Image (cartoon, grey):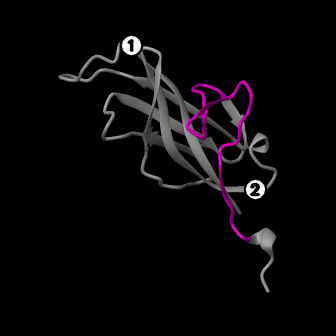
Amino acid sequence: MTDANLTPRTFAMPEIPGVTVPHGGLHFLQPELLLDFISVCKEPLASVTPVAVLYSTVGVRQRIDLRKIPVAIKGRIVYPVSSLSMPSLRARLIINGPFKKLKFQGTLIAATGEPSVQNMTLLGLALEFTTV
């Protein structure tokens, strides 16, 4: 017999007023806000998976899905968030395992030969969490 409490469980970022932005059924962590793991789940977390990036162009919200690669929570990790379909994205997810906190930092920077991202704003990062 296996204990159901020991089975890994994966779930999407919950709605946290003032911290997340809802869009298309997902909740996106706003840039530069420090997120405490306890506000997501009381159980210990094993990994975090970046799912999608939310941005706006002239006030219209758009989403880019990312490759779902889980990032194990071990020590302090700086994970680059990028997408081939949006090369102007310069972002990272900082996971601090010992302090049980994470932060999403990012900007949109125009690269040479790329259309201007002057009117684009980065709104957030959708995450999935896996418990131990």
User: Disc 1 marks which amino acid?
Assistant: Asn
Q: Relative to 85, say whether 114 is above or below.
A: above
Q: Residue at x 69, y 35 (%)?
A: 35
Residue furthest to the left in view is 113
Mark 2 residue crowding within 10 angstroms, few (<14) / some (14–19) / many (20+): few
Is residue 57 rendered to the left or right of residue 128? left
What is the x, y in percent for residue 43? 79, 55
Is residue 60 rendered to the left or right of residue 21? left
Secondary structure beneath disc 2? loop
Among the two numbered marks 2 and 1 on one chain, the one whose residue lies closer to the N terminus: 2
Residues under labels 2 and 1: Cα distance? Answer: 39 Å
User: CB under 8 Å between callouts 2 and 1?
Assistant: no
What is the x, y in percent for residue 57? 41, 19
The C terminus: image quadrant? bottom right
What is the x, y in percent for residue 109? 35, 21
User: Residue 65, located in which quarter of the rendered image?
Assistant: top left
Number of the front mark, 2 or 1: 1
User: Residue 10, located in which quarter of the rendered image?
Assistant: bottom right
Secondary structure beneath disc 1? loop
Is residue 23 rendered to the left or right of residue 92? right
Q: Residue at x 71, y 37 (%)?
A: 15
Which segment did they paint magenta? 7-33
Residue 44's label in the rendered image is: 2
Mark 1 residue crowding within 10 angstroms, few (<14) / some (14–19) / many (20+): few
Residue 119's label in the rendered image is: 1
What is the x, y in percent for residue 93? 53, 38
Q: Relative to 75, say whether 107 is above or below.
A: above
Q: Residue at x 81, y 77 (%)?
A: 3
Q: Relative to 17, say whether 83 is above or below.
A: below
The N terminus: image quadrant? bottom right
User: Disc 2 marks which amino acid?
Assistant: Pro
